[in-house]
Image (cartoon, grey):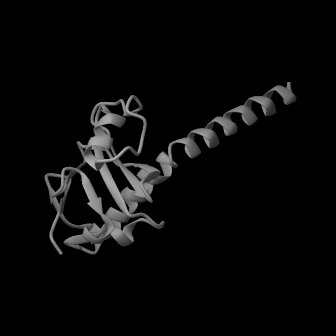
Amino acid sequence: MKKKKYFVLFILVGLIAYTSLRYGGEIYSNVYFSTKLGEMEKKQQESVDLSSFYPFDWDQFVHIGSYTNGKEVNTMLGKKAVEDDEMLIDYENDQKLLFIKNDKIIKEWSMPSIQEIQVTTNSGGVVSRGDALFEIKKVDGKLFLKQVKK
């Protein structure tokens, strides 16, 4: 009986690790994003530069929403970064940031639901590292991040 419990635990840990690696650590990324924004709210910051917000090297990111496939992302970027038929988000009210380095997606980071945070970019969802300044506003418990010109 004890061996069976350990085997089941081993399988569960393996699945969680695989899922976390495959999807860029979605659980971690969602918590990281929420925690960092929470810290900024406490300090009453009015803006955030996302170029220093994320702890890894990237050239640009693409903000995508519900039911986004690879073809839409490739069109936004003007180049092929993902297979056209790959479904990147297949949930209602979901959103992600796809980080690009050397024309390849290096990380997919989930964000809280669009019901909690609304992101507006100046360039149809594509943001370069040098132009990643966003103003932060909170209205009726919902956060709004709006890209601003530097």
Please state, as top left, top right, bottom left or bottom right, where the N terminus lies in the image: top right
Q: Residue sitting at 33 percent across and 63 percent down?
A: 38
Say whether residue 135 is left or right of residue 86: left
In the image, residue 15 above or below residue 1? below
Is any part of residue 138 visible from this angle?
A: yes
Frontmost residue, 126 versus 55: 126
Relative image position of residue 72 (x, y in whole percent): 28, 37
Relative image position of residue 147 (x, y in whole percent): 18, 62
Q: Give the residue furthest to the front.
A: 79
Please state, as top left, top right, bottom left or bottom right, where the C terminus lies in the image: bottom left
In the image, residue 70 above or below residue 53? above
Is any part of residue 69 visible from this angle?
A: no
In the image, residue 93 above or below residue 20? above
Q: Where, by quadrant of the figure, is residue 102 drawn? A: bottom left
In this figure, what is the number of numbered marks? 0
Relative image position of residue 90 (x, y in whole percent): 36, 30
Q: Where, by quadrant of the figure, is residue 120 drawn? A: bottom left
Q: Residue sitting at 15 percent across and 67 percent down?
A: 148
Q: Residue sitting at 32 percent across and 35 percent down?
A: 71
In the image, residue 10 above or below residue 100? above
Q: Residue sitting at 47 percent across and 52 percent down?
A: 107
Relative image position of residue 59 (x, y in whole percent): 38, 64
